[in-house]
């Protein structure tokens, strides 16, 4: 894996997919900025693990749904390192309910945390990356943004919006070689999928051609590829990491 940039910000990196993405990118030689919202101790533990393995990391706490805090966070990174080379918009939430029971606030809060935050991150990254004429961004969407799902009108809208938004950013970034891509994970073993009942998990595994939920590493390796120079001619794309569940 070839990285010619020096640092990366991973949002929501204190747990789940974000944690694995942070560890993987650090092991490939990037300085990783570990963003957290409510888990400072977990974020510190990841930093210590990276450093114990010879990598470089820093912890940065902010709520991605607070646009001023996100802008300030990216400024802190650039003030420290002189640039933001790569960004992974990973932080995300669910708030599942059938549409007929979903309040407008339930819809808007998921859009704000998952989609508006990614917009702010992409916008600030593009400004910074334009100056250096270098950079690559990966947005973590979801298979549900491609297929829809019962109980997830809000979540699917946020993730489908992310897929379309990434293509527009890719067009706007292309003049200066800044790349934007999306990954759409299927069902991956994290806290988010631990919430599913054993019965629901089994019904999904029956439908997955590779007959298992994905591991966080399956997603992290795809992120590393799409950020790195190995994917230099790929932009605006949606990489499905879903075991063949949706092709
Ligand atoms: P997770 O274990 O719940 O982790 C989500 C992380 O995002 C948590 O560390 C959380 O921090 C953080 N976060 C949430 N809201 C935040 C905010 N406003 N500001 C900063 N950080 C925030 O879930 P995951 O499965 O790793 O999900 C990671 C991403 O992958 C999400 O975007 C999710 O939609 C996507 N995804 C996951 C799956 C899957 O099967 N697991 C499938 C498709 C897509 P706190 O705990 O402090 O809130």
Image (tube, grey):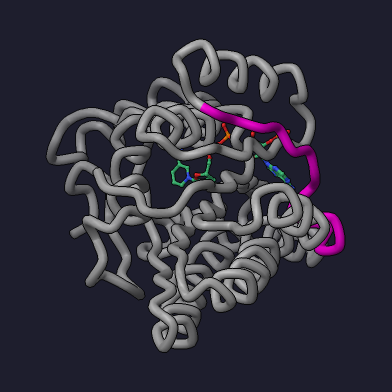
Q: Which residue lies furthest to the top in this view?
A: 52
- Measuring 70% from the left and 50% from the top, which residue is drawn there? 77
- Measuring 65% from the left and 63% from the top, which residue is drawn there? 121
Q: Which residue lies furthest to the left in this view?
A: 209
In the image: residue 141, left or right of residue 218: right
Residue 196 seen from this side: no
Q: Where's residue 242, x and y in %?
A: 27, 46
Quarter of the image for residue 198 reads top left
> Quarter containing ligand 1?
top right
Q: Where's residue 156, x and y in %?
A: 51, 62
Residue 233 seen from this side: yes
The answer to whether residue 226 is magenta is no
Q: Where's residue 28, x and y in %?
A: 35, 34
Up the image or down, 25 lies above or below 238; here it is above
Up the image or down, 107 lies above or below 227; here it is below
Q: In which quarter of the image is the C terminus?
A: bottom left
* Residue in front for this viewpoint, 98 or 163: 163
Q: Where's residue 201, x and y in %?
A: 37, 28
Q: Which region is colored magenta?
A: 56-69
Up the image or down, 127 lies above or below 96; here it is below
The answer to whether residue 64 is magenta is yes
In the image: residue 240, left or right of residue 80: left
* Residue in front for this viewpoint, 25 or 206: 25
* Residue in front for this viewpoint, 3 or 159: 3
- Measuring 48% from the left and 59% from the top, which residue is drawn there? 139
- Measuring 45% from the left and 36% from the top, which residue is drawn there? 21
């Amino acid at each position: 894996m070839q990285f010619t940039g020096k640092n990366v910000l991973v949002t929501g990196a204190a747990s789940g997919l974000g944690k694995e993405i942070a560890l993987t990118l650090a092991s490939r030689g990037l300085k990783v900025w570990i963003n957290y919202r409510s888990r400072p101790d977990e974020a510190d533990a990841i930093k210590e693990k990276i450093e114990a393995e010879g990598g470089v990391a820093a912890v940065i706490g902010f709520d991605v749904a607070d646009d001023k805090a996100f802008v300030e966070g990216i400024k802190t990174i650039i003030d420290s390192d002189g640039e933001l080379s790569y960004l992974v918009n990973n932080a995300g939430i669910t708030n599942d309910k059938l549409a007929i029971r979903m309040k407008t606030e339930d819809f808007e809060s998921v859009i704000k945390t998952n989609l508006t935050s990614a917009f702010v991150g992409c916008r600030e990254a593009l400004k910074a990356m334009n100056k250096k004429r270098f950079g690559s961004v990966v947005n973590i969407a979801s298979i549900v943004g491609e297929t829809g799902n019962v109980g997830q009108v809000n979540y699917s809208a946020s993730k489908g919006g992310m897929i379309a938004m990434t293509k527009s950013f890719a067009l706007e970034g292309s003049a200066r070689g800044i790349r934007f891509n999306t990954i759409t994970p299927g069902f991956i073993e994290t806290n988010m999928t631990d919430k599913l009942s054993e019965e629901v998990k089994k019904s999904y595994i029956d439908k997955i051609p590779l007959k298992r939920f994905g591991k966080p590493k399956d997603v992290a390796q795809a992120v590393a590829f799409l950020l790195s120079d190995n994917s230099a001619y790929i932009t605006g794309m949606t990489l499905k990491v879903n075991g063949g569940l949706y092709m």
